[in-house]
Structure formats: C-alpha cells, structure tokens
Image (tube, helix red, strand yellow):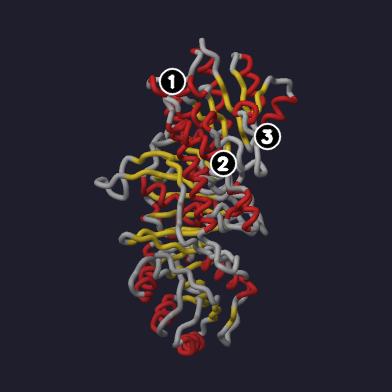
Amino acid sequence: MTQLTALLSVSDKTGILEFAEELHALGARLLSTGGTAKLLAEAGLPVTEVAEHTGFPEMMDGRVKTLHPKIHGGLLARSDLPEHVAAMQQHGITRIDILAVNLYPFEATVAKPGCTLEDAIENIDIGGPAMVRSAAKNWKDVTVLTDSAQYAAVLAELKAHGRTSDKTRFAASVAAFNRIAQYDAAISNYLSALNEDGSKAEYPAQMNATFVKVQDLRYGENSHQSAALYRDLFPAPGSLVTGKQLQGKELSYNNIADADAAWECVKSFDTPACVIIKHANPCGVAVGANPAEAYQKAFKTDPTSAFGGIIAFNREVDGAAAQLVSKQFVEVLMAPSFSAEALEVFKGKVNVRLLQIALPPGGARPWDQGRNAGDSKRVGSGLLLQTADNHFLKREDLKIVTTLQPTPQQLDDLMFAWTVAQYVKSNAIVFCGGGMTLGVGAGQMSRIDSARIASIKADNAGLNLKGSAVASDAFFPFRDGLDVLADAGASCVIQPGGSMRDDEVIAAANERGIAMVLTGVRHFRH
C-alpha cells in the first residue's frame, strides 16, 4: 500500500496528538506547521515542517507558509487524470491524502469584550480556508477534517480498510464547505457592522445567518407545506433545541412552535410553575408550592382549551404531577427532568411526547437565560430583524398613577399577570389572581374584545373575577376597555401607558375604584 501523507495544522489542538500518533502507527508521513509541528515533535513523532517540504521559508509573521504549489498541488491533483499525475512527477509534488485543519478562532476573538479591528483582522485565517477548500473540492482523493470529532471514524476506516470510503470523504467535504461558509459569514457580519468611526452597528450591512438542520418534519403548519427544524450553530444552553425527546411520536412543526412558547414562558418564573399552551397562546399559567399544585391551578383556567395542549414545567415532574397530567390529552410535556415514577406513568401513553430540557444557567445575557438575542420575521423578499423582547419588569419600575394604591398581594398578582401577558398574542388581556390565570383574551383586533373574551372564558371555567388583577400588553386608547375590566370585577390593572388619553383612562380607574400601575413598556406579540 502506498504510504499516506497527512498534513496537520490546527488552531484548536484537541485530540490532534492522539490522532497523529495513530496515523504514525499506520505508517503515515506527517507534515505540519508552527505550533502543531512543535507539539508533535515534542511528543517524539517524526514530523516534517511545511517549510522543509516546500523548500520555501515561512514568512510575514506566518501569513505565508502553506500558500504554495507543493501544498495545493498535493491537495488538488486528481489521481484519475494522467496529466495531473505527470505534473506532480515533473514538479516533485507529493500527494496529500489527509488534511486536518481548524481555523484561527475568529468567532471567539470578536466575541470578546474590547476586541479591536486589528485583533479581528489578525484572526482571519487565509491559508487554512484555502487548504480546506482545495481538499474539499478534491474529495475523491483527499479526506479533509475540520473538527476533532471526525478523527475517530477516520482512524477506524483506515485501520479496517487502509483508506477512507467515498461516503466518508464526501461527508467530510460537505462539512468542510459548511465550516468555511460559517467562518466567512462571521467575518462578513463583523466587518459589515463596523462604522467609519470604528464603532459597531447593531445590524450589519449584510446579514449572514447560519443554522444547522436538526431534522426534517412530516409537514409544516399545514399538511400541504413541507418543513424542517434548524438550530443555531451554537445554541444557548437551556433553549428549546437543546432538549432531548424521551418518548412519543416525532414532534410536528406546530408542536415545536407551541413548545417554544411554553418553554419561554415557564422559564420566566422562579417558583414552581406550569404553563399550558394552545395555538401558541397560554390558556393556563400558574405557580404553586409544587408542580402538581401549579398544574391543577393552570388547568382550571381553561380546561376545554387545555385538551390537546402543550404543557411545560420549570421543575422536575414527579409522580404526583404525572398522575394528574396523564388524565388529560396532552401533545407534549416538557420539564427539566422527570422522576422514575413519572416516566412509568407515561410509559403506557406512547403517543405523549416527553421533552427534557435543562434549565439555563441564568445570568444577565439572553444567552445565559437560554433566550434568543434577536428575532426575525420573513416578509415578501425581505427579512425583519429586531432584538428579542427580553425585557423583564422590576417592581421598582412600576409607576402608580391612581389615588388607590395596590396592596402587596395585588402587586404580586399584577407582576404575575404582566409576565404571562408577554407571551399572549396581541391584543392581550390577562386576568389573574392567587398566582394563576383566571381568563385570557388573545389575538383580537380590538382590546375590548380581548377583555370580553377573557371574561367569558373565566365564566365558562367557573372562575370568579371579582378582585382580580389584569394585565394589558399595550395601553388603553380609550376608557371603554377599562370599563369592561371593571364590570368584570377587576380590582387593579397593569398597563404600559403612553396613550394620548392616559389622563382619561386614569380618571376612569379612579372613578371605578381600581388601582392602576404603568410599566412604560409594552409587549406586542404578533
């Protein structure tokens, strides 16, 4: 068998020494550069520096070392073309069979606070991507590796067959081109966001998004639409796509959209909470001493809509909670974990999808909270981008504008109602009391209609709205919306304020004996 030649030149040296040792044991010739060559040599491996191989010195602070015909000829030459083989012999070019390259850490560099343009430019790899592209283009002859996770499979094939399979080389080529696309997108995003004065624009002049397919879906929002689920290249811990499905049928497009709404909402509570979602809207939300109590309270809000809903907990689902949930038809049940008893309860319900997602670590950044930093929406031949609605209201931000002051209990209920309203489609009206939703009005063209629907739903569920707290996701343009809430029994209201008729609405609240607080922030959700 012809001796294999492997060129190893990596920024991230995870696993490279072990990989090189195995290649050497298989009789491969090792070529390398800079720090990688030094690491291999210090481990006692026979390694040839690229400068020695090309006969041309490394120069310009390492910027020029692999950009040479003996490197790219060795990567690009096709073994099935006699003229390529003849050219290699004429010019003393050795075929390179394996290329292991990962790139300068551009993404990690620009993510650091205080990164300068000079820092960014110096971490733009040139030789690495050039070699990767050459090897990936010539995948029938060259195995190109851009991730240490690929090493083991390649070694297994080499040990078993003396070469890698066409399937492995092609998959590695695709992965390599994907990595180059990701790298170039990151560079473009960073550089096109720089202003002339050196400051960084919030939105780059060109937006290059990178997502990785998780799975194809049976269909989209409707059966005549196709669909697939993608994730961020680096998903935030505690986000939906990091979850693990423990049992049940494959998640559908609508399941995933609803599950995301449920998970984002339930993560917002510090105490044990349960959220029930139907058609992307919360139909029941509650906190309790434990998951079972939270579920019972959430279910009471709208038992009819809860049928076939998506349920999320922010605590482990134990046997008691599982027994209660199992009595209803549920599409997806989500939690940070499930006890052995809970798993046993659902073992017989094979169609129930159990999704386990670790809670995010917590912190100031959206990433730490398992949230998106930005949102997007497709429009005709265009894309709307915005920062995500990650605003969380603090009690000290509230402005009490009525003569009647809310009690401590009312403030608790108002804060709870406001948290829920953030996840209800606009126009949103949410009645709450005692740590649970009492009536939810969502997605109406008129705020008055949303208020009436919330009241009707509470009445249908046998829930009394007298003394309830109400959240409105946006301001009341007229007093008539407030009058509907007062007629239903509301005792206090939380709303953004900012209407031209705020004084009229506040006067109406005073007239009706309702305490009102303003947030100064709205939560439209379209």
**Residue depth check, mark 2 versus mark 1: number of the one nearer the observer:** 1
Q: Nearer the viewer, residue 442 or 483?
A: 442
Q: Which residue in the structure is indicated by mark 2?
A: 337
Residue 252 in the figure: left or right of residue 23: left
Q: Position of residue 273 (x, y in %)?
A: 55, 54
Which of pointers 2 and 1 lies earlier in the amino acid sequence? 1
Q: Position of residue 225 (x, y in %)?
A: 27, 47
Residue 451 in the figure: left or right of residue 163: left
Question: Quadrant location of the C terminus?
Answer: bottom left
| Distance CA(mark 3)–CA(mark 2) | 46 Å
Q: Position of residue 95 (x, y in %)?
A: 51, 22
User: Does 180 sit above or below residue 264?
Assistant: above
Q: Are marks 3 and 2 in contact (CB under 8 Å)?
A: no
Q: Residue, x 55% and y 71% (percent of image)?
A: 414
Mark 2 burial class by Cα count in 10 Å: few <14, some 14-19, many 20+: many
Q: Which mark is residue 85?
A: 1
**Residue depth check, mark 1 versus mark 3: number of the one nearer the observer:** 1
Q: Which residue in the structure is indicated by mark 3?
A: 34
| Distance CA(mark 2)–CA(mark 1) | 59 Å
Residue 30 in the figure: left or right of residue 522: right
**Which of the 4 image quadrants contains residue 435?**
bottom right
| Residue 37 makes an appearance in the image | yes
Q: Are marks 1 and 3 in contact (CB under 8 Å)?
A: no
